[in-house]
Image (cartoon, helix red, strand yellow):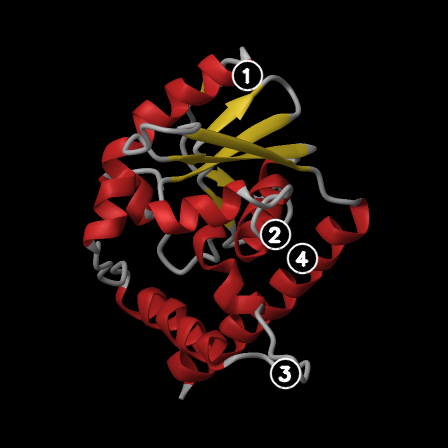
């Protein structure tokens, strides 16, 4: 989770972001949108009405991740031999009010997403051979905004003294996956626009 500068926070006002894309498009097993969608929609409308970013509460676990991010990036470089270039927010080249803030860019086609979870969560990820499903929408949206091909999911736990402290799982989605998430984003943002216009024109 990248620490945002004040200007980056302002840039995100009323915009669909990668960290919240799951709330915007997530569905139940029955195929219906989850309640988080409407909550997030109202947040974006409120931000546009007030021109103020919603307050963001940082938990102890989240702060741990922020504090470990630089070390995680260095561990990834040491593990892979690749160089990470830090970047700011990237606006989607076609879709308005949509952006992502990757944890770093790699080469001309890649990027990374860093997570520094509790050790029990880290262990579960180590035992799997793919990027965790719950973070794939975030990576998809980052790739869609940056127009890149792959994202290395990087998990880091410096508390580990027996076993690897860093785990890398490459996520390389299909064209259809990228297309589908963009269509979902367009639909969600159209709903945000409609509610905002309804409110300000009443």
Question: Quick one: 173 or 122, which is closer to the camera?
Answer: 122
What residue would you read off at disc 4? 181
Label annotation for residue 95: 2
Q: Nearer the viewer, mark 3 or mark 1?
A: 1
Tell me the element at label 3.
loop
The CA span between labels 3 and 4 is: 16 Å
Task: Mark 3 or mark 1: name the one nearer the start of the chain.
Answer: 3
Question: Quick one: 23 or 120, which is closer to the camera?
Answer: 120
The residue sitting at 40% across, 24% down in the picture is: 73
The CA span between labels 1 and 4 is: 29 Å
Q: Nearer the viewer, mark 1 or mark 2?
A: 1
Tell me the element at label 1.
helix
x then y, percent, for residue 26: 57, 70
Tell me, yes or no, whether the two marked residues, 3 and 4, touch with CB atoms within 8 Å.
no
What residue would you read off at disc 1? 80
The CA span between labels 2 and 3 is: 24 Å
What residue would you read off at disc 3? 32
Does residue 89 appear anywhere in the picture? yes
Q: Is residue 126 left or right of residue 69?
A: right
Q: Is residue 109 left or right of residue 34?
A: right
Tell me the element at label 4.
helix
């Amino acid at each position: 989770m990248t620490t945002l500068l004040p200007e980056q926070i302002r840039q995100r006002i009323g915009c669909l972001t990668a960290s919240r894309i799951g709330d915007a498009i997530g569905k139940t097993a029955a195929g219906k949108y989850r309640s988080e969608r409407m909550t997030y929609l109202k947040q974006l409308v409120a931000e546009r009405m007030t021109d103020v970013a919603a307050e963001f509460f940082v938990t102890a676990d989240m702060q741990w991740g922020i504090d470990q991010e630089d070390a995680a990036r260095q561990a990834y470089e040491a593990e892979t031999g690749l160089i990470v270039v830090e970047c700011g927010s990237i606006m989607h080249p076609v879709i308005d009010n949509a952006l992502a803030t990757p944890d770093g860019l790699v080469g001309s086609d890649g990027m990374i997403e860093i997570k520094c979870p509790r050790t029990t969560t880290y262990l579960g990820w180590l035992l799997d051979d793919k990027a965790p499903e719950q973070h794939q929408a975030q990576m998809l949206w980052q790739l869609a905004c940056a127009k890149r091909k792959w994202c290395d999911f990087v998990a880091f736990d410096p508390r580990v003294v027996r076993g690897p402290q860093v785990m890398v799982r490459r996520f390389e989605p299909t064209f259809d996956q990228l297309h589908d998430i963009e269509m979902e984003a367009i639909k969600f943002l159209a709903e945000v626009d409609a509610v905002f216009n309804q409110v300000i024109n009443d």
